[in-house]
Image (cartoon, grey):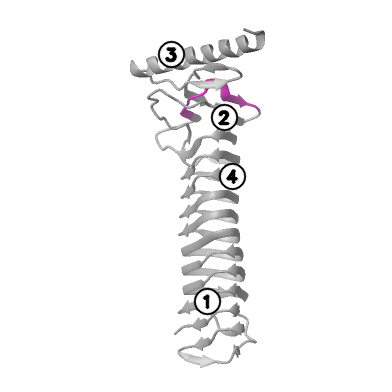
Amino acid sequence: MGKALRSIVIGFLIVAVGLSMVLVGSWQGGGSEVLWHHGRFWVPQSKQIQANYPNIKSLDIQGDNLDITVKSNPELKKGMQVTGHVTNATGLSMQTNQQKLTLSYHDAVNKMPSFSDTINVNEQVVIQVPANTKLQDVKLKTTSGDLTLKQVQIFKLKTRNNFGQTRLQQTEGQQITLASQVGLLNLDRSQAKHLKLDSVSGLLQVHGVKLEQTQMHVVQADVNVDHSQLGQTSLNIGSGNTNWKYVSAQELLAQTGEGNYQLDQVQLYGTNVITTNRGNITTAKLQTKGYRLEVQNTGINMWHGQKKPHSFMKNNHVDDQVVLATYDGNITVNQ
């Protein structure tokens, strides 16, 4: 037998022995995940996170596969408490520098099929601060996982995830930027001076917020907003529907490539423009004084139950007015 062939046979034998050991461990109730890493079998070690920091004002948290939660805890009187669980202890790093906590986590890579009865445990980090704590700069980023902020005050917040949900509940900030590749962006009873939402695909849900300036950029997603004050607003959607109910905005510039607008009891201040290339614009109890309706190609204009020409204006010289325009679609105002 040649040396090359002998080496191949020995290699197969080693792999076979390793796999047989995995199977035996599984049959005997083993619950560890076995990985192939840098040319060998490897069992990663999990780690429980339990740490307290006395004077942290800023956060930079990043993870490959990690749920991240930042919330207030009324029972916590001082400091910051960090808890959680990860399955790859060697991939975890926690450092502090000048009132800033930096935490990074890298999941195990190069996985072989797992033959063991592995117990699935969420990789997560939970950060708790006392009530009324004002954080300065918070950055949260995860490749796959959920980002949650609950009842916290932050001067500047920036989040990004590729796959997962981002939720803000009763959160206050000066500058809030939320970005998502695929997943839900949800704001509930939160406040900000400036809000920016970026979504490639998913759903934007906004409820009970109070904002001074709002920017939304969406590639393919629906935008649902209710009982909210958006302030000066710009909205750019490639494909998706916009549904607003009990919403106020000023100097609104809304542009959609393909999708419908449904505006129910919306108050618009200043000069506002709402356009869609292909889709319908429907309003109910829209509150503004001046109107300009434009159907540029196919479709009809309906004004309070009456059919109007493709180009129709009403009180268009007043301070509060709106332009509603579609290339292909119908415009229905307060029918």
Q: Is residue 29 visible?
A: no
Amino acid at dot 4: Arg
Residue at x 45% of width, y 25% of height = 114
Say which amino acid is labelled 2.
Asn
- Quadrant occupied by the C terminus: bottom left
The magenta segment? 82-97
Q: Is residue 269 above or below residue 131?
A: below
The residue to which callout 1 is attached is: 280
- In the rendered structure, which amino acid carries the disc numbered 3? Met
| Residue 71 circle label | none
Q: Earlier in the sequence, mark 2 or mark 1?
A: 2
Under mark 1, the amino acid is: Asn
- Residue 63, image x and y in percent? 56, 34
* Disc 3: which residue: 21
* Residues at circles 3 and 4 in contact by the CB criterion of under 8 Å: no
Front residue of 132 and 161: 161
Q: CA distance from mark 1 to mark 3?
A: 63 Å
Tell me whether the residue at label 4 lies in contact with that at label 2, contact meaning CB atoms closer than 8 angstroms. no
278 or 218: nearer the viewer:
278
Which residue has dot 2 on it?
Answer: 55
Q: Position of residue 85 (x, y in %)?
A: 46, 27
Marks 2 and 3 sit apart, C-alpha to C-alpha, by 48 Å
Against 144, residue 325 (above or below) is below
- The tag earlier along the polypeptide, 4 or 2, is 2
Query: How far, Cα to Cα, is label 3 from label 4?
Result: 41 Å
Find the residue positioned furthest to the left: 28
Q: Position of residue 162 (x, y in %)?
A: 57, 44
Quadrant of the rendered structure where residue 212 is?
A: bottom right
